[in-house]
Image (tube, rainbow, N blue to C red):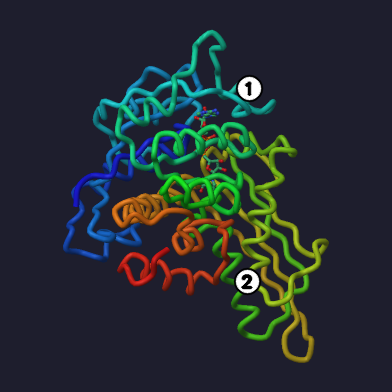
Amino acid sequence: MGEIRVALAGIGNCASSLVQGVEYYRDADENSENISGLMHNVLGGYRIRDIKFVAAFDIDKRKIGKDLSEAVFTDPNCTTKFKDVPKLEVEVMKGPVLDGVAETTKDSFLVDQKQLPVDVPKILKKTKAEVLISYLPVGSEQATHYYANACLDAGVGYINAIPVFIASDDAWVKKFEEKGLPCIGDDIKSQVGATIVHRTLTKLFEDRGVKLIKTYQLNVGGNTDFQNMLERHRLKSKKISKTEAVQSQMKDRMLDEDIHIGPSDYIPWLKDNKVCFIRMEGKKFGDIPLTIDLRLSVEDSPNSAGIMVDAIRCCKLALDRKTSGVLKSPSSYFMKHPIEQYSDSEAKTRVDEYIKGTRER
Ligand SMILES: NC(=O)c1ccc[n+]([C@@H]2O[C@H](COP(=O)([O-])OP(=O)(O)OC[C@H]3O[C@@H](n4cnc5c(N)ncnc54)[C@H](O)[C@@H]3O)[C@@H](O)[C@H]2O)c1
C-alpha cells in the first residue's frame, strides 16, 4: 500500500519507544494476526514497517543535529531499550521552544538560546510528511498550537498525544476540516495503563449494578513527563482528560469531590516505570460496601507506542480516503479525551468498522 511518512515533534521517551517499535516489528510475518504486543499487525493493508520517519523536531541541544536513531537514546530519555535502531537519515531539527520547558524541567531539557528554530511547515513540505505526531510535554499549549498550525499550513494530518485540546475542540476541528486534513486526539490512552483499567472497572461496576461512591487514581513515575507535571498549573487539561475518561463510563456523574485522578509525584529512580494506585469504593446488593485496591506497574512509553502504531495507520487511511476533520472512532479508542466518548468495547467495534471502511470516521 506504500509508505506512511511521519514527522515527530518531541523526541522524548514516547518517540523512542515508537521508533524502536517500528524496527522491532519490521520483519513481523504479515500473514499472522497474533503477534505479541500488537492490536493489528496489518491495519487497512498497512504494515508496521510501512511507517517511515521523515522529520523530527526537538529543542534539547543534545538531540538537535543527531540522527533520529541516536537522539531517541540520548539523555534525558530513560525508557528501556528493546531494539537497536539503524541510522534513519533523519536529522533532529530545532523547533520553537515557546512554552515547552517548565520550571521543573529547565535542567533536564537543555536549550541553547542562540540556536535558531527551523521553519517547521517548510520542513514538513520538503520532507513530504503526511502525518505529524505531537509528543510535547504536558502544558505546552502554545507549542501545540504552533505544530497544529504548521500541519494546517503544510497539508499534514495531526495526531495529538498530549492533553492540550485540539481534536476535541470544535474550533480546531473545523480548521482541519476546512483544509481537508484528518486529526486524531487528544491525550493518548495506553495499551493497558491506568486509564483503561480504571475505565473498565468503572464500567464493570456500572454494568453489574454496583454504585461507585468514591474513587482515586494516583500515579508516580521517574521520567521527564512526571518531572514536568510537578508544575501543577501545567496539569489542568491533563486532570480534565484523565477524570473525564473515567466519569464518561458512568450514567450518573460522580460529585467532583468524590473522584480524584492525577499524577501525584516524581520519583527519579523509577525512570520510565509508572506505578498507579487505584481505589474504588462502591455499594453492592443491600448497599453492602465493596472495595478494590489495585496497584499497576508499567513501563510507560512502550505502552503508548503500542497504540500509536495503529493511530498512525488510521490517520493514513483517512488521507487515502480523503476524510477530513476529527476521526471520532480512532480518537475514542486511542485517546483519553476524544470529542465523543464511548465505552472501550464500543469504541473498538467502531474502529474495526472504520478500518473496514463501513464507518466514515
Ligand atoms: N507515556 C504514555 O503512555 C503517555 C500517555 C499519554 C500522554 N502522554 C504524553 O505524551 C507526551 C510525550 O511524553 P514523553 O514521555 O515522550 O515526554 P518526554 O518528556 O520524554 O519528551 C518530551 C520531549 O519534548 C521536547 N520538547 C519540549 N518542548 C518542545 C518544543 N517546543 N518543540 C519540540 N520538542 C519539544 C523535549 O525536549 C523532550 O524531548 C507527554 O505530554 C505525555 O504526557 C504519554
Q: In this rendering, which labeled residue sits more in front, label 1 or label 2? A: 2
Residue 157: x percent and y percent? 41, 45
Residue placed furthest toward the front: 178
288 over 302 or under it: above or below: below
- Could you tell whether 241 is left or right of 127 in the image? right
For label 2, being within 8 Å of ligand 1 is answered no
* Residue lying at the far top of the rendered structure: 114
Local SS, label 2: loop
Q: Residue at x 33, y 45 (%)?
A: 21
**Of label 1 and label 2, which has the lower sequence position?**
1
Residue shown at 51% from the left, 62% from the top? 332
Give the side of residue 184 with respect to residue 195, left or right. left
Identity of the residue furthest to the bottom in this view: 286
**Circle 1 crowding by C-alpha within 10 Å: few under 14, some 14–19, many from 20:** few
- 27 or 149, which is in the foreground? 149
Comparing 313 with 195, the one in front is 313
Number of marks present in the image shown: 2
List x then y, in percent, for residue 20.
33, 40
Residue at image point 54% right, 8% down: 114
Relative placement, left or right, of 225 versus 356 is right
Q: Which residue position is annotated with label 1?
A: 106
Instruction: Measure the alpha-carbon separation of dots 1 and 2.
Output: 38 Å
**Location of residue 163 in the rendering, given as x and y in whole percent from the top left corner:** 60, 46
Q: Amino acid at mark 2?
A: Gln
203 vs 132, left or right, is right
When asked about the image quadrant of residue 35, the answer is bottom left
Q: Which residue is mark 2?
A: 249
- Residue type at mark 1 is Lys
Q: Residue at x 43, y 25 (%)?
A: 74
Kindly indicate whether the residue at mark 2 contacts the one at mark 1 (C-beta within 8 angstroms). Answer: no
Badge 1 marks a residue whose secondary structure is loop
**Residue 279 placement (x, y as % from top left):** 70, 65
